[in-house]
Image (tube, rainbow, N blue to C red):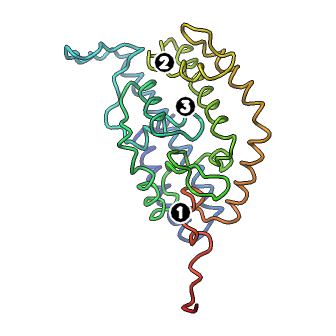
Amino acid sequence: MDASIEDLEARMSDLRGRLREAVRTRDKAGAALVREALREADAAWHAALEAEAESEAERGEPATPAAPAERPLSAAHPRPPVGVPVREQVHQALTILGAPASPKLISATYQAFFESQLATTKLASLRRDEERSFTSQGHARPYYICAALNHDRLSPARGLLAVSTWPLERRAIAPLSPRADFLAHAIGTGEQIRRLTLVGRQPSDDALRLLRRFAFNIPGAYDGGEPDPARVIASARDEAAVHRAADDGERRSAAERARDQLSDAQQLFGVTALRDVLGDTSDGTS
C-alpha cells in the first residue's frame, strides 16, 4: 500500500534529522544514502499530492463559483496553486527549463505552465536565503536554489539561478553555455507542452508564446503561426549538437576544478571573494 502524505512527511522529517547528524559527524557515505532517500521521499510526496487532487476531482466535489472577474476553471486552466513557497515555484520552473535561467525567464515559465504569477521581486533575495539555510543546516533539504558558476573564476554567474541537485557540469557557465542553455530551455519548454497535450490538456496561450519566443531564434524551428513543439525540439537539438563538444569540455574542466578547490557551500553558491579560495593568510606581518 502506498504511503500517505502524512506518513511521507513524517519520514522526510526523520530523514532530515538523520542527514543533519550524518553531516555533523562527517559521515559522507551515510549522508549520501540519506540524501537519496530524501529525494525519493520528496518525489513520492509530490506523487501522492497529485493522486489526492485527482481523486478529489473524480469524486466530483462541487467547485466554488468563480468571481465575475475570474476566468472559469477547466482542465486547461487550473486554479493557481495556493500557498506554494517561492523556492518550490522556482524549482518547478527550473525543472521544466532544465538549465540555469534568469529570474525573468523563471517567472515567465511558471506563469506559462502553472498560470500563477511569480513576481521577480520575490527572487531577489532567494539565493542569499538559500545560502544562509545551507550554511546553517547543510544538506537538510532535498534541494536548494543555488547559483550557476562562471567557468573561469568559479564565482556566481550574475542573474542566473540553478538547482543544487544538478551536476556541476550543468551549472558551470562557459563562453558557449548561454547559447547551449537557451537551446535547453527551448527543448524543455517544448517537451512540457507535449506532455500536456499527451494527457489531453491544452497548453496556455502564455506557454505557446514562450515557445514561440524560443523558436524565433532557432534556425529551422519556426515559419509562422502556432509553433510546433516537435519541430522546435528537433531544431534545438540539431544546433545543440554543434556546440556540445566544445561547451561540454569547458564545463567539465570547470566542474573538476570546483570539486578540487571548493567547499560544498562554494560549489553551490560560488566564490564571492579571493579569500574564499585562499583563506585568510594574514599572519600580522608585512
Residue closer to the observer: 159 or 84: 159
User: How many numbered markers are drawn?
Assistant: 3
Residue found 65% across the figure and 44% down from its top:
170
Tell me the SS state at disc 2: helix
Residue found 44% across the figure and 53% down from its top:
13
Residue closer to the observer: 52 or 97: 97
View extreme (front): residue: 286
| Numbered disc in front, either 3 or 1 | 1
View extreme (bottom): residue: 285
Residue 194, x across and y down, in percent: 58, 17
How far apart are the alpha carbons under marks 2 and 1?
37 Å
According to the image, label 1 marks what residue? Answer: 272
According to the image, label 2 marks what residue? Answer: 209
Tell me the SS state at disc 3: helix
- Which quadrant: the C terminus? bottom right
Tell me the SS state at disc 1: loop
Q: Residues within 10 Å of mark 2 (few under 14, many from 20)?
A: some
Q: Residues within 10 Å of mark 1 (few under 14, many from 20)?
A: few
> In the drawing, what numbered circle is on residue 223?
none
According to the image, label 3 marks what residue? Answer: 96
View extreme (top): residue: 225
Residue 148, x across and y down, in percent: 58, 49
Residue 84, x across and y down, in percent: 36, 38
Residue closer to the observer: 103 or 133: 103
Pointers 3 and 2 in contact (CB under 8 A)? no
Residue 153 found in image quarter:
bottom right
Residue found 62% across the figure and 74% down from its top:
278
The amino acid type found where label 2 is placed reads Arg
Residue found 47% across the figure and 50% down from its top:
12
Q: N-terminal of the two: label 2 or label 1?
A: 2
The amino acid type found where label 1 is placed reads Thr
Q: N-terminal of the two: label 3 or label 2?
A: 3
